[in-house]
Image (cartoon, rainbow, N blue to C red):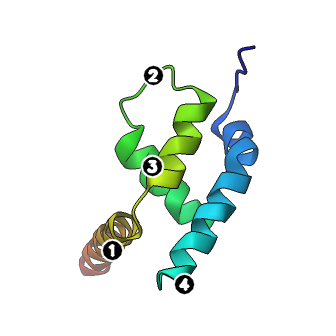
């Protein structure tokens, strides 16, 4: 049986239990500040950005295989980009 999702939000809601489980795992490894959305956004913008026809099992597997360090570095880069944009706006 093939399951299709018409929006990213539907898919997010479907895999939220996997995201919660991954978050609990990362908390045990000291990444207490990472949220489910952080893991999701990391995968959306890195792993899945050019992917097509991912199965639900592929998505869940990618969630469970995500490394805390990689998610952390992604968030750090995103925040630095946001700060640069904000600094640029203040100069103008």
Question: Which residue appears at 71% of the width and 15% of the height?
Answer: 2
* Residue 10 position by quadrant: top right
Residue 79's place in the image compared with 14, above or below, is below
Image location (x, y in percent) of residue 48: 42, 37
The residues tagged by marks 4 and 1 sit, at their Cα atoms, a distance apart of 15 Å
**Disc 4 versus disc 1: nearer the observer:** 4
Location of the C terminus by quadrant is: bottom left
> Which mark sits nearer the N-terminus, 2 or 3?
3
**Residue 26 place in picture, x, y as percent:** 52, 73
Q: Which residue has dot 3 on it? A: 43
Kindly state the secondary structure of the residue where label 4 is placed: loop
Q: Earlier in the sequence, mark 1 or mark 2?
A: 2
Q: Nearer the viewer, residue 48 or 86?
A: 48
Q: Can you give x and y, in whole percent of width and height, for residue 44 in the image?
A: 46, 45
Which secondary structure lies at badge 1?
helix
12 versus 21 height, above or below: above
Q: Residue at x 45, y 22 (%)?
A: 52
Residue at 63% in and 38% down: 8
Q: In which quadrant is the N terminus drawn?
A: top right
Q: Crowding at label 1, few (<14), some or many (≥20) Cα neighbours within 10 Å?
A: few
Identify which residue is drawn at 52% across, 33% down: 58
* Disc ID at residue 52: 2
């Amino acid at each position: 049986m093939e399951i299709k999702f018409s929006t990213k939000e539907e898919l997010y809601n479907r895999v939220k239990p996997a995201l919660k489980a991954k978050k609990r795992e990362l908390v045990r490894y000291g990444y207490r500040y990472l949220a489910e959305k952080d893991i999701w956004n990391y995968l959306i913008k890195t792993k899945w950005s050019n992917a097509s026809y991912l199965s639900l099992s592929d998505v869940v597997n990618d969630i469970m295989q995500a490394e805390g360090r990689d998610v952390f570095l992604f968030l750090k880069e995103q925040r630095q980009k946001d700060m640069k944009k904000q600094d640029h706006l203040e100069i103008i």
